[in-house]
Amino acid sequence: MGRLDGKVAVITGGAGDIGKAAGERFANEGANVLLVDVDAEALAAVCQEMDNAYIASFTADVTRAEDNLAMIAEATRRFGGVDIFLANAGIEGSVTPITECDEADFDQVIAVNVKGPFLGLKAAIPAMMARGGGSIIISSSVAGVRGSANASPYSTSKHAVIGLMKSAAKEVAAHKIRVNTVNPAPVESRMMRSLEEGLAPGLADQVKAVMQSNIPLGHYATPQDIANVMLFLASDDAAFVTGSVQMVDGGMMA
Ligand SMILES: NC(=O)c1ccc[n+]([C@@H]2O[C@H](COP(=O)([O-])OP(=O)(O)OC[C@H]3O[C@@H](n4cnc5c(N)ncnc54)[C@H](O)[C@@H]3O)[C@@H](O)[C@H]2O)c1
């Protein structure tokens, strides 16, 4: 018996470190998973590597309304509906102070990290209503509950999705749809390597050491640590959990 037997999950950012780990975890618990990403090549490589009969893929850009509708339609066509939606696609943007940040960079981070989840919820909620309920999880961050110097578009976007999550949780509770955010501390991932390098070019290892010293458990999370909490929120074990900000941060925000 898997914890997600008979469920259908759609995961955006499915070719990335966290999306891939969540896809594998959900599939191993019995869910049919549609991994969605804008990077078709990376998505194909991830699916080939996982070689899991429960996992299918779909190329879509979360900033486009029609792509969000298409990914939900694809999950419904393939698997009969949608029970779990993980709005996880995200970009870090450039690491610069506000005074040097390009307006276009700000717009792009907000488009992917905020408008993406908004359009995803708009597409997924009717499908979940048709199923009689579901679970929506949005990837926020520790940067969603405190400021991050030199990463203001990213931090702004991760705060914004908490507002989206809380509003949606109230709107859809009567339809038995739960909505929560997962807020990781730094994860062993491509994104953190990029941020470390951006914060101090050539000194990424030192940046990582400082970051880790701010985490009481003493190290970065693994993508699997994050996927485990996403699984909890996706499953019926979290039947009374909605509107919550789930920190997965090794105590960083304590
Ligand atoms: N890595 C961390 O340390 C960390 C910490 C806290 C929160 N997060 C958040 O978790 C989520 C996943 O992060 P990750 O580490 O797996 O990052 P990642 O860069 O490995 O994966 C993100 C994926 O999103 C995809 N993507 C980007 N723009 C897209 C678009 N317009 N449409 C569809 N897909 C798009 C990318 O192609 C990529 O595969 C992000 O929202 C991130 O902000 C990550």
Image (spheres, rainbow, N blue to C red):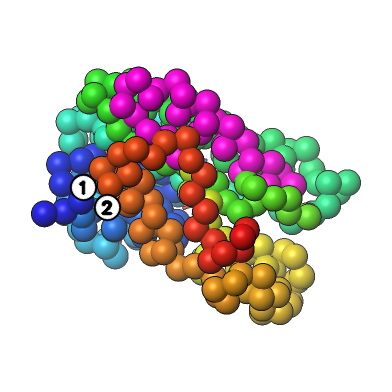
Is 6 placed above or below 118 here?
below
The percent position of residue 208, horizontal first and vertical second, equals 65, 74
The residue indicated by pointer 1 is: 4
Mark 1 or 2: the one toward you:
1
Label 1 Cα neighbours within 10 Å, binned few <14 / some 14-19 / many ≥20: many
On residue 130, which mark appears?
Answer: none
SS at mark 1 in the image: loop
Residue lying at 16% horizontally and 53% vertically, measured from the top left: 2
Identity, as a three-letter code, of the amino acid under mark 2: Phe
Which mark sits nearer the N-terminus, 1 or 2?
Answer: 1
- Tell me the element at label 2: helix
Residue 35 lies, in percent from the top left, at 33, 47
- Is residue 244 depicted above or below 25 in this figure? above
Q: Residue extending furthest right? A: 99
Secondary structure, magenta segment, majority class: helix
- Residue stretch in magenta: 151-180
Q: Residue at x 35, y 55 (%)?
A: 22
Q: Position of residue 26 (x, y in %)?
A: 27, 52
Comparing 229 with 68, the one in front is 229
Judging depth in this view, the residue of 214 and 79 nearest the camera is: 214
Count residues near mark 2 (Cα–Cα under 10 Å), then give few for <14, some for 14-19, many for 20+: many
Mark 1 and mark 2 residues within 8 Å of each other at the beta carbon = yes
The magenta stretch spans residue 154: yes
User: Residue reaching furthest left?
Assistant: 1
Residue 209 drawn in magenta: no
Instruction: Say if 44 sits above or below 75 in the image.
Output: below
Residue 62, position in %: x, y? Answer: 48, 36
Residue position marked by numbered label 2 in the rendering: 26
Q: Quadrant of the C terminus?
A: bottom right
- Disc 1 to disc 2, C-alpha distance: 7 Å
Residue 76 in sight in this render: no
Identify residue type, mark 1: Leu
